[in-house]
Amino acid sequence: DGKYFPISSKGSERCDAWELDYTIAEHERVLKKISQSKDVYQKITYSGILRVLSRLHQQKSDYRKALEYLITARDFDLQQRHSSSLHNYDIRIKELQDILRFK
């Protein structure tokens, strides 16, 4: 039907390195397809997938990549005028920047 959805994670359970890498790869695959889509519904999920990728990379301790995805999500939401979650972005971005600064 042309719609793409990322696979779901295991919620609060920790996954092993293989599962984490697989989940990241699947989300990145879906993100690529959505970014090329002209479907408005698909575009709505774009920043959500970016936020999930940020969390997954943070779980993997790849804080630089986590920060990159989070900033991209924030910038996309700013462009789309979704300002309701901008404060949360700022908090998470600062947390990741602090981790990188003291690492």
Image (cartoon, rainbow, N blue to C red):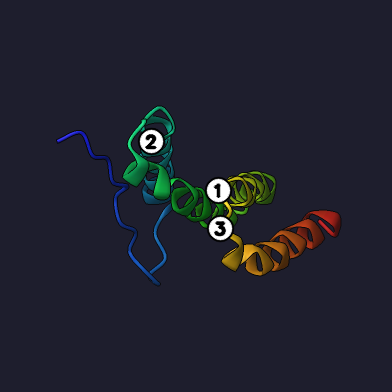
| CA–CA distance in space, label 2 to label 1 | 15 Å
Q: Which residue occupies 28% across, 46% down?
A: 5
Q: Which residue occupies 40% across, 72% down?
A: 12
Count all numbered tags in the image, as a single digit: 3
Query: Marks 3 and 2: which is nearer the front?
Result: 3
Name the secondary structure under disc 3.
Answer: loop
| CA–CA distance in space, label 3 to label 2 | 18 Å
Looking at the image, tell me whether mark 3 or mark 2 is earlier in sequence order: 2
Q: Badge 3 is on which residue?
A: 82
Amino acid at pointer 2: Ile
State left or right for residue 33 relative to residue 101.
left
In x, y percent, where is residue 41? 33, 46
Amino acid at pointer 1: Gln
Quadrant in which residue 30 is drawn: top left
| CA–CA distance in space, label 1 to label 3 | 6 Å
Mark sitting on residue 69: none
State left or right for residue 9 relative to residue 103.
left
In x, y percent, where is residue 95? 74, 65
Residues at circles 2 and 1 in contact by the CB criterion of under 8 Å: no
Amino acid at pointer 3: His
Q: Badge 2 is on which residue?
A: 34
Q: Which residue occupies 61% across, 62% down?
A: 83
Q: Badge 1: how crowded within 10 Å, few (<14), some, or many (20+)?
A: few
Looking at the image, tell me whether mark 2 or mark 1 is earlier in sequence order: 2
Residues at circles 1 and 3 in contact by the CB criterion of under 8 Å: yes
Name the secondary structure under disc 2.
Answer: helix
Residues at circles 3 and 2 in contact by the CB criterion of under 8 Å: no
Q: Using the image as rendered, state which of residue 95 and residue 80 is in the foreground.
A: 80
Q: Is residue 31 above or below residue 80?
A: above
Q: Which residue occupies 79% across, 54% down?
A: 100
State left or right for residue 103 relative to residue 25.
right
Q: Badge 1 is on which residue?
A: 80
